[in-house]
Amino acid sequence: MSSNAVADVTGRGAKATVLVVACGLVIVPFLGIVSTSLASPDQVTRAGGFVIFPTGIDLSAYRSILAGGVVTRSILISLFVTAVGTVLSITLTAMLGWALSRKGTFGNRYLLILVLISLLFSPGLIPSYLVVQQLGLLDTLWALIIPTSVTAFNVVVVRAFFVGLPNEIIDSARMDGASEWQLFRHIGVPLAKAALTVVGLFYGVGYWNSFFNALLYISDSSKWPLQLVLRTYVVDNTQLGAEDLGAAGHALPPQTSIQMAILVISIVPIVVIYPFLQRHFAKGVLTGAVKG
Amino acid sequence: MSTAPAPPRTHDTTERRPPSPPAPRRRTWWDRLKRDKFVLLLALPGMAVIITFHYYPLLGNVIAFQDYQPYLGIRESLWSGFDNFSILFNGDPDLLNALKNTLTITALQTIFVFPAPIVLALILNSLASNRLRQVVQSVLYLPHFLSWVIVVAVFQQMLGGAGLLNNYLRSSGHQALNIIGNADAFKALVTSQVIWKDTGWATILFLAVLAQIDRSLYEAASVDGASKLRQTWHITLPGMRPIIVLLFILKLGDSLSVGFEQILLQQPAVGRQASEVLDTFVYNNGVIGGAWGVAAAVGLVKGVIGLLLVLMANKVAHAFGEEGVYKA
């Protein structure tokens, strides 16, 4: 027994180390990025580009990216795509999820199978591009919205939730003469609010993060969403001039500060909705995985 | 199920049963279509999106057999038989290089990325304090929700030439390390990025499985004097086996797809030799290079092989008595 006890203690030490290191690997980079975006230009220059503990707070980097130039526009575009896309996605997903949960209706099983099979493969890059091209969506923001507006996985999650609703409620409403629309609108949707919120948040994160579709379908740089701007000016390190930023005539903060401010802006919405997401996601994901 | 007699619908006045039916009448499909038209109407837009963007593009794969010209379109372009596939059979060096890189990254991911969440889930599960566990989970789940652009940018800021690590090394009098632009380090870098982004998130499933393992098994084992390690080996891991096998099969089906966005974003820093994978090969040759037919052919073969891998792995899983992804 005593050798077991020793093993347990060293085990505990090892566990604690792993967890502390893992959390540190996530937290430290964010801390550095936020700090650098807020640090004064002097401090950034002195530190050679990166600051962990800013001595004061200087918002000039944020002022310059929000001055109405390239970055501002891309933020507005991303907000538009995210808002419109999420509303569309929730609506279509709720409707399809409800329809697929109505067992015994015409073609129900076949539709469900079609949805499930689409989970197993992706159609391929080139053919997808050709379809978007044929539909005339190239270089429109709709190319970022419509192709990803309904995700089979989310449909399966929502359907599982509807299937789990007690039959008695639906039957008694039908007894009272509710039409199928009333069942959906006044019973299904309100009861599924939690599930639809989570699914909506997932869609929202997807739209906000959409990079590859934008790269593929949007060549007009005036329609770039934030992720493409991030790629060009932060990852590829293309310099942002005063004119690009719409801040001509002002002294610019160091490029690093500007880059870190763009990075922070792209992360903020995720961090803001994260607590709401987190409250439900484990359950949502598991319903989808188990019943799918 | 669809042949079962419909339940009597007392509220429905327009549709009374005949006075004395000889047997419950089966509805014709037209009747059912009419009855269910509203439900079908609800399904329509969503199904339209799935069919348009998941099934209809499959037809577009025909350009793999064409000398596809974008300005002519699929209908006008000339057929070329298997010409586009000759790149596969002639052992095109760029394609072979892309295949080699893809398989290397898959191997690294299988060895390092795949077990990471299992280990992490075991550690999290053994924490006595629920509160602590939730805090750690909250922190470690977060990177999953960041886009690859953000993750790559974060890594550059940490490990790049002017990044945090090198700042520290320089200020303490060491030589700076070139990690981001180093072709030799690329595959390790890519692997560690995947670990950073998704290990926490991937624990969700494992933790759910762990929560379902019967507590009394552990009590019995500890009465018999089994150490924590032996309990893990003989109770916990066998309990997790079905889900591990399932995820492994799914992973195998993805062997030829490795972090497309992630790799494309970092290609300029290290060059194609080190970083080209099958997906970026298709993108670079098709969309960028204009060799649409060749790219589609490579993509098609890749997709078919991926599907075959899943089917085969599933068969193997059945042979070992596991449930696999689906039955039959």
Image: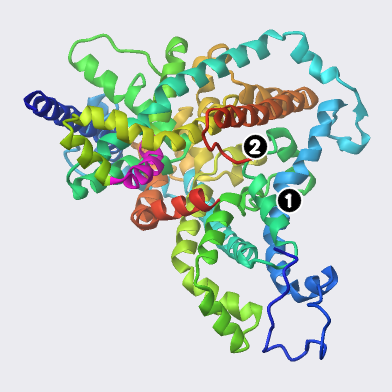
Badge 1: how crowded within 10 Å, few (<14), some, or many (20+)? some
SS of the residue at dot 1?
Answer: helix
Task: Give the amino acid type for the residue marked by disc 2 in the picture.
Answer: Leu
Write down the quadrant of residue B312 in the picture. Answer: top right
Q: Which label belongs to residue B51? A: 1
Q: Residue furthest left?
A: A2
Category of crowding for the residue at label 2, using alpha-carbon neighbours closer than 10 angstroms: few (below 14), some (14–19), many (at least 20): some
Which secondary structure is most common in the magenta stretch?
helix
> Residue A207 magenta-drawn?
no
Residue at 54% from the left image edge and 66% from the top image edge = A162
In the picture of the structure, the residue carrying the numbered disc 2 is A216
Residue B203 on the magenta span: yes
Q: Residue at x 31, y 44 (%)?
A: A60
In this picture, residue B200 sits left or right of residue B290: left
Q: Residue at x 32, y 37 (%)?
A: B121
Q: Secondary structure at mark 2?
A: helix
Examine the rendering and report whether any part of residue A92 can be seen.
yes
Give x and y (percent) for residue A283.
Answer: 41, 55
x and y, in percent, of residue A284 in the image: 45, 55
Q: How many marks?
A: 2
**Could you tell me which chain the residue with mark 1 belongs to?**
B
Q: Which residues are magenta?
A: B199-214
Residue A129 falls left or right of residue A67:
right
Check disc 1 and give the amino acid type: Ile
